[in-house]
Amino acid sequence: MPLADLLYTTGRPQIDRAIAGVVSIYEAAFPARVRGYYLVGSLSRGTAGSNSDIDLEIIFKDTFLPDEAERLILIRQGCRALSPIHLDLPARDEASLPHSDTVAIKSASTLVYGEDTRASMPLPSIETYLRRVSIPTHRALTLEFRPLPVSLPLSYPQPETEFYGYVATDPNHPHFIWGTKIWVLDIGWMATFLLAYQASILVPSKDDMPHLYREHINDTWTTFIIEVHDLCRLQWEYTIPSNLDDRARLRALCEQTLAYENHVLNLYQAWLKSESEHGDTALAAERLKAFK
């Protein structure tokens, strides 16, 4: 059986082959069940670096069948084991779209296979979107770098180290293989939360976040957020620079992170309080347990 004939090429044969392989496996495992496959993220926007993941949104027709959820887990694990490039393969059914975050797929994706139904996809309400982007924001403020429950105000994860614990330089550290990626993504997710909470803005992608932040918030953190994005993501591609001047710049950005985190935390806690009073009370109660 030949690989799926994609509707879009990234211009990178290895990545295109991996995407075609994923599509072919899903089409064989779930015949006539997938409506469309959408590439999101930097590969879709032409801004991918050498360390970029493959982010492929998979939309199933109608409603998931009873056995599909369990099979999806196994198929996803198998695809990841076979691919030399990290695969992010979220799958949703059409019935769930009105209640989920469709911003990236509707506004910043490329159809690679199947039927294009983006025009009929609804955008989420700002309340739904805030709950979605609060998930990585909560993780960034808590267990990503700190044990639970987290003491307030926040302190540096490892103040004695070169990068204050935000960047893993020890090969035995679980974040080591990611370089600065975990930290950079966290900065971006927190900025995305601020855009949604303070300005009711939906952010299509990581590439859109810096200019949207400057346009709609433009506070004392704008320069920091843009420098982390431009230097660490685009220029250094999540690697830890070896040049001493660049390394000193990275250290300075890490040093600023704590004050940024505490700024975000104040607004995040205000949002949790409003959720506890007028929104998802269970979510708010559970999240607040993470802080002491």
Image: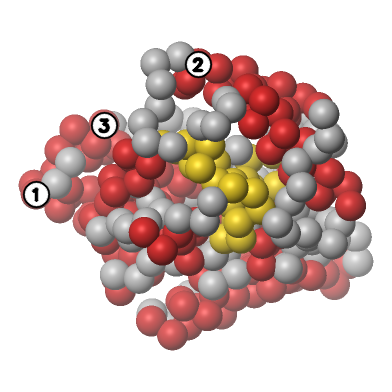
**Disc on res. 120:** none
Identity of the residue drawn at 61% across and 60% down:
110
Q: Amino acid at mark 1?
A: His
Quadrant assignment for the C terminus: top left
Q: Amino acid at mark 3?
A: Glu
* Label 2 vs 1, first from the N-terminus: 2
* Label 1 vs 3, first from the N-terminus: 1
Q: Using the image, determine if residue 168 lies above or below residue 209.
A: above
Between disc 2 and disc 1, the foreground one is 2
7 relative to 65 in the view: left or right:
right
Crowd around label 3: few <14 · some 14–19 · many ≥20 (10 Å): few
Residue 221: % across, % down: 48, 75
Identity of the residue drawn at 45% across and 55% down:
117
Pick whichever, 250 or 61, lies toward us. 61
Identity of the residue drawn at 67% across and 25% down:
28
* Residue at image mark 3: 286
Q: CA distance from mark 2 to mark 3?
A: 27 Å
191 relative to 73 in the view: left or right:
left
Q: Quadrant of residue 246?
A: bottom right
Identity of the residue drawn at 54% across and 65% down:
108
Between disc 1 and disc 3, the foreground one is 1
Q: CA distance from mark 2 to mark 1?
A: 35 Å
Between disc 2 and disc 3, the foreground one is 2
Q: Amino acid at mark 2?
A: Glu
* Residue at image mark 1: 278
Pick whichever, 87 or 215, lies toward us. 87
Crowd around label 1: few <14 · some 14–19 · many ≥20 (10 Å): few
Pick whichever, 40 or 29, lies toward us. 29
Residue 234: % across, % down: 74, 68
* Residue at image mark 2: 70
Q: Using the image, determine if residue 91 lies above or below residue 267.
A: above
Q: Using the image, determine if residue 121 lies above or below residue 177.
A: below
